Image (cartoon, grey):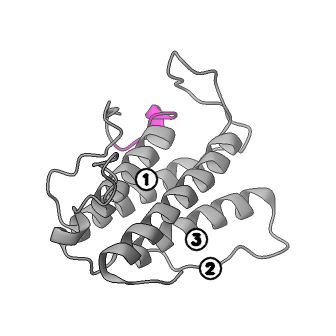
Amino acid sequence: MSVERVFPDGTADEREVLTGFLDWQRATVRRKVDGLPIELADRALLETSPRMTVAGVVSHLRQTEHDWFAGSFPSLADETFARDSDGGWRTGGRAIPDLLSGYEAECAQSRRIVAGLTLDTMQEFTPPQFTPVSLRWILTHMVEETARHLGHLDILREKLDGTRGY
């Protein structure tokens, strides 16, 4: 179910650039973690951040997709939106293939939600501690959020088994 990594065209419009770079980052998540055994995927390498594991990052990225797309536009979501107060960091011991399947399914839902909206569409739901933002803002934030966590995955994977690459 993974998406092929293709950079957006250099002459693409704003929407194609935002969604294209987000899909590039999403596809890179799979490349970074595919094939890692669960005993390594659940290994915490940072004493002060025990939930910062490869499995935890993938689980968190799934929850972040859910929070920002299904959570912001619940009328377009496949099921009733449920926010995880832990941010999705707890994995329940699920193996990488299961975590990736869940992440990719959530990304597919996010793509369906985005397809029906304009970049100027404002959130249907905004958590009380925030001010409403546009889909443009959400897409930009998700490019940043996903890329930031890919940096974590780069470091974790290399420390765990020496695998490197982008």
Local crowd size for mark 2, using a 10 Å CA cut-off: few (<14), some (14–19), many (≥20) = few
Q: Quadrant of the C terminus?
A: bottom right
Which residue corresponds to mark 1?
109
Contact (Cβ within 8 Å) of mark 1 with mark 3: no
The quadrant where residue 43 appears: bottom left
Q: Are marks 2 and 3 in contact (CB under 8 Å)?
A: yes
Q: What amino acid is found at the position of numbered circle 3 in the picture?
A: Trp
Question: What kind of element bears circle 1?
Answer: helix
Q: Real-space Cα distance between discs 1 and 3?
A: 16 Å
Taking the view exactly as shown, the residue that stands out farthest to the top is 128
Horizontal and vertical percent position of residue 139: 63, 49
Q: Look at the image and give the residue range highlighted in magenta.
A: 71-78
Which of pointers 1 and 3 lies earlier in the amino acid sequence? 3
Q: Is residue 1 visible?
A: no
Q: Residue at x 72, y 44 (%)?
A: 119
Quarter of the N terminus within the rendering = bottom left
Q: Position of residue 14 (x, y in %)?
A: 79, 57
Q: Nearer the viewer, residue 40 or 25?
A: 40
The amino acid type found where label 1 is placed reads Gln
Q: Is residue 136 visible?
A: yes
Q: Callout 3: helix, strand or loop?
A: helix
Residue at 59 percent of width and 30 percent of height: 123
Q: Is residue 159 above or below residue 110?
A: below
Q: Which residue is mark 3?
A: 24
Which one is closest to the eye, mark 2 or mark 1? 2
The image quadrant that residue 103 belongs to is bottom left
Magenta stretch holds residue 75: yes
Q: Secondary structure at mark 2?
A: loop
Residue occupied by mark 2: 6
Alpha-carbon distance for marks 2 and 1? Answer: 20 Å
In front here: 165 or 84? 165
Q: Which secondary structure dominates the residues rendered in magenta?
A: loop
